């Protein structure tokens, strides 16, 4: 049911930026989760990435096949797409596709939940950062979203006097509703350029 040892090692290396992956039984195989968000399944020794939003369009354009699950003898086509041999051979592209699967799965999960009542409930934020944000006048989720990552970062910098690009990316991820590791490339690159100019 599980992947070969070599493929599993490749999987762990390629998805290392997700942090610790967890798995649980699902659809007769296993699901892969990062931060509690299911973004892939492993069934019959094959890896399938979850297709949501733009990710699904890309997966279909590449010719990736859906996973078909048999439920009480009835075939059910799921929105998970098989990673073929050519994609296994391109580690960079496989990692990119996995990040997309995670990113759009997270958006779907967040969309199904109510807007978090507290800052600590956003991705990348916890109690400690919530307290720091309170001290600079950012007390609500709406405050953070209205100010944006850059202005919120500058307020925190005035309070803590520390420059930390990871904090900037964490704030942006919280606003976007995703883990900082899977921020859309355009947003990430803009923030990295801005932070570099800031410290010069």
Image (spheres, rainbow, N blue to C red):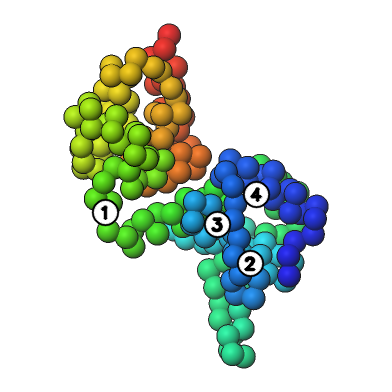
Which residue bears the numbered disc 2? 30
Residue at x 43% of width, y 9% of height? 200
**Residue sitting at 21 percent across and 41 percent down?**
140
Q: Nearer the viewer, mark 4 or mark 2?
A: 2
Disc 4 + disc 2, Cβ < 8 Å: no
The alpha-carbon separation of the residues under discs 1 and 2 comes to 30 Å
- Using the image, tell me which numbered label, if any, was put on residue 33: 3
Local SS, label 1: loop
Taking the view exactly as shown, the residue that stands out farthest to the top is 200
Q: Mark 4 points at which residue?
A: 94
Q: How far apart are marks 3 and 2 (CA)?
A: 10 Å
Dot 3: what SS?
A: strand
- Find residue 115 and name its label: 1
Measured in 3D between alpha carbons, the distance from the residue under mark 3 to the one under mark 1, in whole angstroms, is 22 Å
> 194 above or below 72?
above
* CA distance for labels 3 and 4: 16 Å
**Which of the 4 quarters of the picture holds residue 115?**
bottom left
3D distance between C-alphas at marks 4 and 2: 19 Å
Is 37 displayed left or right of 96 in the figure?
left
Circle nearer the viewer, 1 or 4: 1
Q: Earlier in the sequence, mark 1 or mark 4?
A: 4
Residue at 75 percent across and 49 percent down: it is: 9
In the shown orientation, is residue 21 left or right of residue 56?
right
Say which quadrant the N terminus sits in: bottom right
Residue 60 seen: no
The crowd level at tag 4 (other Cα within 10 Å; few <14, some 14-19, many 20+) is many
Residue 25 in percent (x, y) is at: 61, 70
Q: Nearer the viewer, mark 3 or mark 4?
A: 3
């Amino acid at each position: 049911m599980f992947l070969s040892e070599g493929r599993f090692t490749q999987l762990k290396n390629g998805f290392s930026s997700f942090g610790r992956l967890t798995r649980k039984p699902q659809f007769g195989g296993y699901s892969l989760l990062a931060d509690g968000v299911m973004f892939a399944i492993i069934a019959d020794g094959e890896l399938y990435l979850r297709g949501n939003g733009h990710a699904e369009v890309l997966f279909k354009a590449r010719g990736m096949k859906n996973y078909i699950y048999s439920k009480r003898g009835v075939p059910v086509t799921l929105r998970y797409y098989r990673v073929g041999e050519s994609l296994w051979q391109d580690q960079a592209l496989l990692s990119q596709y996995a990040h997309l699967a995670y990113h759009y799965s997270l958006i779907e999960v967040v969309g199904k939940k109510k807007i978090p009542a507290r800052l600590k409930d956003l991705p990348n934020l916890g109690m400690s950062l919530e307290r720091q944000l309170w001290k600079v006048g950012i007390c609500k989720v709406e405050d953070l979203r209205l100010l944006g990552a850059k202005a919120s970062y500058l307020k925190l910098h005035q309070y803590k006097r520390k420059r930390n690009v990871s904090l900037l990316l964490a704030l942006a991820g919280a606003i976007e509703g995703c883990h900082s590791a899977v921020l859309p490339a355009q947003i990430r690159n803009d923030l990295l350029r801005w932070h570099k100019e800031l410290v010069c």
